[in-house]
Image (cartoon, rainbow, N blue to C red):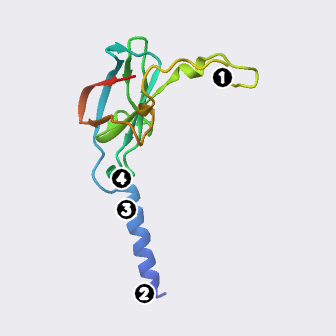
Amino acid sequence: MEISPSGRSVGRALLAALLIAVTGCGKPVQRGQAEGIVRCGGQPLADVRVTFVPSEDQGRAVVRAEGTTDGQGSFELYSEDNQSGVIVGHYKVIVEDMAVYSAPRAPDGTVLKRPSARFAPKFRDLRQTPLHEEIHAGTQKVEIELSK
């Protein structure tokens, strides 16, 4: 039985795809460990979600990372791809005040009394945030200072 030239091309393409799937392609992604503290006016902020969004030039391999501050304003970042560490690269940083989720609500879920703003709204908007951080390989401490 003779295989046509087009059949050989298909066979080669399938073999190449299988090799890439088994061995992977490209270099492994570097990761770092990041923890930090969020302050406003020098005071630590509890119950704030910190999200690191990859800069546009990072490509699709880089995913978001986030953490939530504890009572002392400290957080640890976790990558959205469920892998250990945060992918090395440049990030925009946004913060969200989680206090709104524990605010009193009506039976239909409407917030009855919004908590007062603890920091300026620009910090929660990806287009306006002035916060940028770079994650390096290894362990690092990130300090985020917000204003009202």
Distance from label 3 to label 2 (Cα)?
21 Å
Residue hosting label 2 = 5
Residue nearer the viewer, 133 or 86: 133
What's the distance in space between the residues labelled 1 and 4, CA to CA?
Answer: 38 Å
**Number of residues whose C-alpha sits closer than 10 Å to that of mark 2, classed few (under 14), some (14–19) or many (20 or more):** few
> What residue does disc 4 label?
59
What number is the disc on residue 84? none
* Figure check: 55 above or below 141: below
Instruction: Give the residue drawn at x 35%, y 55%.
Output: 24
Q: Say which label, 3 or 2, has the lower sequence index.
A: 2
Task: Name which residue type carries label 4.
Answer: Gly
Mark 4 or 3, closer to the camera: 4
Q: Is residue 86 above or below residue 3?
A: above
Q: Earlier in the sequence, mark 2 or mark 1?
A: 2
For the residues marked 2 and 1, what is the alpha-carbon distance in whole angstroms? 68 Å
Q: Earlier in the sequence, mark 4 or mark 3?
A: 3
The residue indicated by pointer 3 is: 19
Instruction: Locate residue 98, reporting x and y percent.
Output: 52, 22
The residue located at (44%, 75%) in the rendering is 11
Q: Earlier in the sequence, mark 1 or mark 4?
A: 4
Residue 63: image quadrant is: top left
Name the amino acid type tagged 1. Answer: Val
